[in-house]
Image: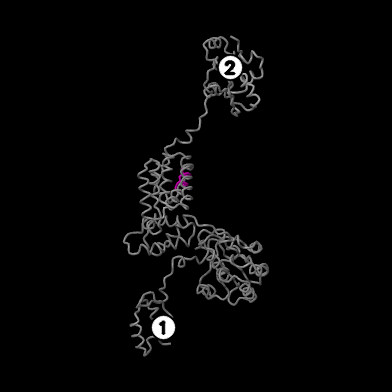
Amino acid sequence: MLLKSFILKIARSGHEFYSFGQIRKEAAKIKFNGSLLALNLFRKHCYCPFKGSVVSQSFQYLPFARKYRPTNFYELYGQEVLVKALSYAILHNKLAPGYLLTGIRGVGKTSSARIIAKTINCTTKVIKDGQVRPCDHCLNCQSFNNHAHSDIIEIDAASKTGVDDIRQIIESSEYKSLLAEYKVFIIDEVHMLSKGAFNALLRTLEEPPERVVFIFATTEAQKIPNTIISRCQRYDLRRLTFNEILSLLNMVVNKENLRFEQEALKVIAFNCEGSARDALALLDQASCFAAGLEDAVTVETINKMLGLVGVSNIIKLLLHISNKEVSKALELVNNVYISSGDIELLLRSASDFLAYLNKAKLLPNYIDSIYESYQAEIKEILSKNSLSQISVLWQIFNKGIIELKSAHNQLMICEMVVIKAIHFCTFPEPEQLIAKPTHPLEAAAEYDEDKIVDFLRYVYSHKEIGIYYLLLNEVEIKGFADNILTIAGSNITEKTKQQISNLLAEWAGEKWRVTSIVQTKIVSLKEQLINKAKKNEQWKMINEKFPFADISDILLKNK
């Protein structure tokens, strides 16, 4: 007992390291012989990360994700719906028998379950800004913080999946709580339970014993039977926004006295996909990777650590593509390939950036925080490319990612994607290829008008009034040359085309072919002839004398 007291004494003394020789020397002072037993006993109470020295458990390192795990609703980022609903339920004693918390990794499912369990059993709850918080001083709070609360039972469903495990939970729920007001069962990864285990839980979950609460946490709610979900209040925990992640990272950096550039933290926030745990894990990794650096951790350091392609390289690549600089673009691709090794990241990053450019093109005030420092370059790219061009470039890079997965040479595929993108930029803009609306007369096709008029006179003289009226009023003449007549209209039958073809053959003495185009809006031959007549000087003289006069019809006289 003397040695144990001595060990606890030096463990609390504030010194970090003690060599075995020092311990044995101190042990001799209290007349304790048995160095091996002394060391074993010391190791039982202490943690030894370095050979030849030991450090007390109070100095055991905690990763940021555990150290800054939320302990109350105020510290829980991004889950306003859960906080508001549960605060009201706890304050007004309207707790449901079961809660289902679902969402992606690292958004606070297990943390929220623990906060609920701790808060509902706190004897002196604190109410602030409409939120209820545990006091952290009562017996229940202290027992929970020390992981020694007998009435808050946490179970990992991934390792306890069977009916027997659930039977133990059901039997335990029958007994009243020892310390707290509620007995709480937290079942993490609940989707891993077997079908029989879920069935065994149904009755107890629907009508649980008094003062018993079940809290389920899962990333895959679709695997849970609907009979279980319908007996719970479900809360879908959302991803954290970019700004929420950035705020969390800044808080940790300030508390840990770390030196990070703001842009470096933005890269971490951008790459954690809305997961607070992922963000803190990356920050933890970056703080170790950059240990010993005199300057603040930079974007380049984070990119190197994560094997990312820097935003500056992506923007340079798009500038080279917009400027049709093939050699510079390929050189940049090769440099990225040598430095990062994963060329797929380049295509993915370029695809993400092009998706951002599409939004920026449509929404002039749209700014993504990760690209905030590159607005001048972005404006240059947007000025050189239309919306349709940027959309097609996005499709080229997005398709390139798919092709890359089955390629035997990823660098070659990436180079071909860049060349294809540059080649596309040499084409006219799609908007330029679309014909602009023109005046009906200007839109009419060019052909020998005298010949078609001669043919119409021939048709009229042979009493083919239906064909004559059709060609003059109901169709648009698109072409009349090289023994081919092209007409446009909405209702041209094969029989009509054959009749016209036969008449043309009789008129010309050789075979003609008639083709048709479906077109609702037409400029008939009659309209074209009237417009031509109105440009005649004689008509202008008539119009001066009779300003309300108009040309109502065209009569084709025989020569």
Q: Which residues are magenta?
A: 353-360
Q: Does residue 186 show up magenta in the picture? A: no
* Distance between mark 2 and mark 1 Cα atoms: 118 Å
Q: Specify the farthest residue to the front.
A: 510
Helix, strand or loop under label 2: loop
Classify residue 80 as left or right of residue 342.
right
The residue singled out by tag 2 in the image is 509
The residue singled out by tag 1 in the image is 40
x and y percentages locating residue 99 in the rendered image: 61, 64
Q: Tell me the kind of residue under disc 2.
A: Gly
Seen in the picture, residue 482 relative to 373 is either above or below; the reply is above
Residue at 48% in and 35% down: 431
Q: Is residue 530 visible?
A: no
Q: Tell me the kind of residue under disc 1.
A: Asn
Residue at 48% in and 39% down: 388
Classify residue 119 as left or right of residue 329.
right
